[in-house]
Every structure is written in C-alpha cells, then in structure tokens.
Image (tube, rainbow, N blue to C red):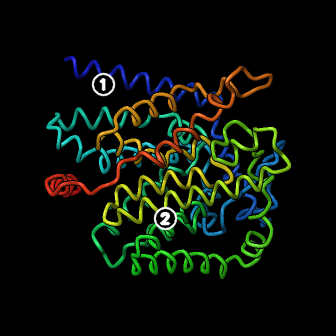
Amino acid sequence: MKRISTLVGLALLTVGAIVFTGLRNEYFDSKVYYGAVQYWFRDGGMVYDFLRPGTPYGFTYPPFAGLVMSPMAYLPLWLVAAVASVATIATTAALMWWLAGPYIRQKGWPFRYAIAIAMLLALLFEPVRETITFGQVNTLLLALVTADMLFGVARGRKWAGVGIGLAVAIKLTPGVFILYLLVTRRWRALATSIGSAAAATLLAGALFPDQSREFWTSALWDTNRVGLLYYLSNQSERGLLARLPIETVESRVWLVGVVATLAAWGWRVFRAPDDVVGGLALTGVLGCLISPVTWIHHCVWLIPALVRCVEMGRPYLGISGYVLMTSHLTWLWEKRPRPPLELLGGNIYVWFSLALLFWTPLGTRSSSEIHESDKIIA
C-alpha cells in the first residue's frame, strides 16, 4: 500500500508539473513545425521562408527532418501534439529501462516498482517536461542514439552507427557521436554512421533540391532563426558567455572554450574506449556544452550522465544535478534587473554540465551487470 501511495503521489506531482509548464510553453515548437510543414507540403512554399506569425522563429532542421515530419501536413494540430507527447513519454520510459534497469537489478530492488519511480523522476526532470510542453523531438533522438550505442556499437553489430547517422540527418547536433566513434576508433560504425547520414541527406536533396540548397547555403548559418544567444534558456558555454559583458571577444573566448572542452572530452573517452555507456553519457554532455544554442529542453542529453553518476559511485553529483536542474531555480534570473549571483544561478545547467564532463565515472560494468542488462533487454 505504501508503494502504491508513493507512486500515485509522484505521478500526481509529475502531471501537475507538466501541466504547469504546458501553460507557459503551449506546444510552441510543435506549432512552428506544423506551420512550416503545412506551408511546404500543402501550400507549395519554401519551408525555410516560413516564420510563425508574430515571431522570428521558423523551421531550423535539415530537409530530411521535414520529410520525417511530413505527415503533420495531413493531421490536425491537436493530434500532432498528442502524438509528440506520447512519443516523449514512451522514449523516456525506454531510456530509463535501458540505463537504470541494470542498476536496479544489481541492487535487488523490486524491479517494477523501482523502474516506475525512475520513469516518473525522469518525466519530472525539467528538460523532459519542457520537451513535452514545447512539443520537441529531443528524447526521440536521444533514444535513437542510445539504442544504437547500447545494442549496436557496444555489441559490434554490423548495423552499428545507423541510428547515429539518422539522428544527425534529422538534427545536426548528434554529430558529436560521430566524433566519439572516431576517437574510440570504431571504424566500421564510423563509416556506417557517416554513410547513413549522407544517404538520408542525399535522399532529401534528390526529393527537395530547392529546400536542400536553401538550408545548406543560407538557413543553417542564420542564427537569428533559433533565437537570441543570451536568452537564459540557452544553457551552453556560448550562452553563458553571451550573458557576460564581453561582447567584443565573446566569439573568440567561446572558440577557445570549445577547443578546451573537446580536448577534455577526447582525453577521457580515448582512455576508456570499451565503456560505451560512459561514452554515451560523456558525449551527450559534450553536445550540450559546445553547441552554440542549447535550450533547456535540449539538456535531456544529460540524463545518461546523471544515471551513470548515481550507479557508479558519485550519487552526490547525479542527485544534486537532478534536483537543481528540476527545481526551475534558473528562471529566477530570466528578466532584468536580475538578482545577485546571476553568474551562478543563471547558468546552473552549464556548471553541472562542466562538472559532469570532468567527474562522470568511466569504466566498464562488471560481467554480472552486463548479464543483467542483457536479461532486461531480452
């Protein structure tokens, strides 16, 4: 009875937090996608010319993503939002099953109860809440890459790299996982990921040459399409710097920071090439840090690192990171004049991402844990 009460209470808290967040976000991104795809496939317009009325925001993904989203042109908006929400919930549940399941088995906890708690806590995580209420695709891409890494790359499958390649063709930021395959010298998976990304991109180019030309020569480089770099929700290194009074040297400092971040990441994953789960965790952190724009909902890529910290001896880092990045505390610094300690409070995700980059534990699981993981997957 106590377990049921705990689950019900946590479920109500999660639903309440999602509803509260939804009142603010109102499926904003899904509305942008929906309008752009409608304009493209039904009105015959150039997808990258579309801007949501009253905003500077338009479609920012490669043409292959538009092809994947093309059913939106023939569905009502409410159904698109519903499908996006269900897909986010389902992929979040799958991620917890894959990432937290082996640890739960190892601890000997009641599996169904513990995995349900893990899934609800993941849904309560602010980046996941924001993914649901913006109508974003973040957890879908994370699940695609995670499945490829765990079931393809880690097991040396011939098809390993396909999921990474498709994710890159949909949205460029998962390209950091191609770097991971390069640094860890997984040549077959590297070639497969590049080939998959290229094939999907060329397919979109053959079907939609005008849109492809526009994206690769113009839309990709127009940073105004994605929003202001200094906006609080941009929790990347570039966002942190953009909020500092160093406009004249901001881009140069950022480039130095990117190089240093890549070097730290590369050194760590190079020294632990067999730890694919750790590589997944660390590379997700890398993507959040070096991307010019990492909105808070993009930070679902931190989930594998938070789980890894809890399961491998650094629970203080994983739990404190989860709590502070779920608390909505960052938003106290959203509007000017901002309270004191803006440098700390307004960049919570950046600071924890840097901490995860250096202190997420790396090292392969024991054979018993791998066996338990195989049973869960089966």
Which is in the foreground here, disc 1 or disc 2? 2
Please indicate whether residue 352 sits to the left or right of residue 310 in the image. Answer: right
Q: Position of residue 89 (x, y in %)?
A: 43, 42
Quadrant of residue 269 within the rendered picture? bottom left
Please indicate whether residue 8 sits to the left or right of residue 51 in the image. Answer: left
Q: Position of residue 349 (x, y in %)?
A: 57, 38
Q: Is residue 349 above or below residue 66?
A: above
Q: Residue at x 80, y 65 (%)?
A: 45
Within 10 angstroms of label 1, few (less than 14), some, or many (20 or more) residues? some
Quadrant of residue 101 within the rendered picture? top left
Within 10 angstroms of label 2, few (less than 14), some, or many (20 or more) residues? many
Q: Secondary structure at mark 1?
A: helix
Q: Position of residue 268 (x, y in %)?
A: 43, 59
Q: Is residue 89 above or below residue 120?
A: below
In the rendered structure, find residue 177 and report the number of the disc placed on it.
2
Q: Position of residue 20 (x, y in %)?
A: 57, 24
Q: Is residue 41 above or below residue 182?
A: above
Q: Residue at x 63, y 75 (%)?
A: 204
Q: Residue at x 35, y 66 (%)?
A: 273
Between 252 and 315, the one lying in front of the other is 252
Between 323 and 343, the one lying in front of the other is 343
Q: Earlier in the sequence, mark 1 or mark 2?
A: 1
Say which quadrant the N terminus sits in.
top left
What residue sits right under mark 1 in the picture? 7
Please indicate whether residue 351 sits to the left or right of residue 216 in the image. Answer: left
Please indicate whether residue 87 sits to the left or right of residue 251 in the image. Answer: left
Q: CA distance from mark 1 to mark 2?
A: 35 Å
Q: Secondary structure at mark 2?
A: helix
Say which quadrant the C terminus sits in.
bottom left
Q: Amino acid at mark 2?
A: Phe
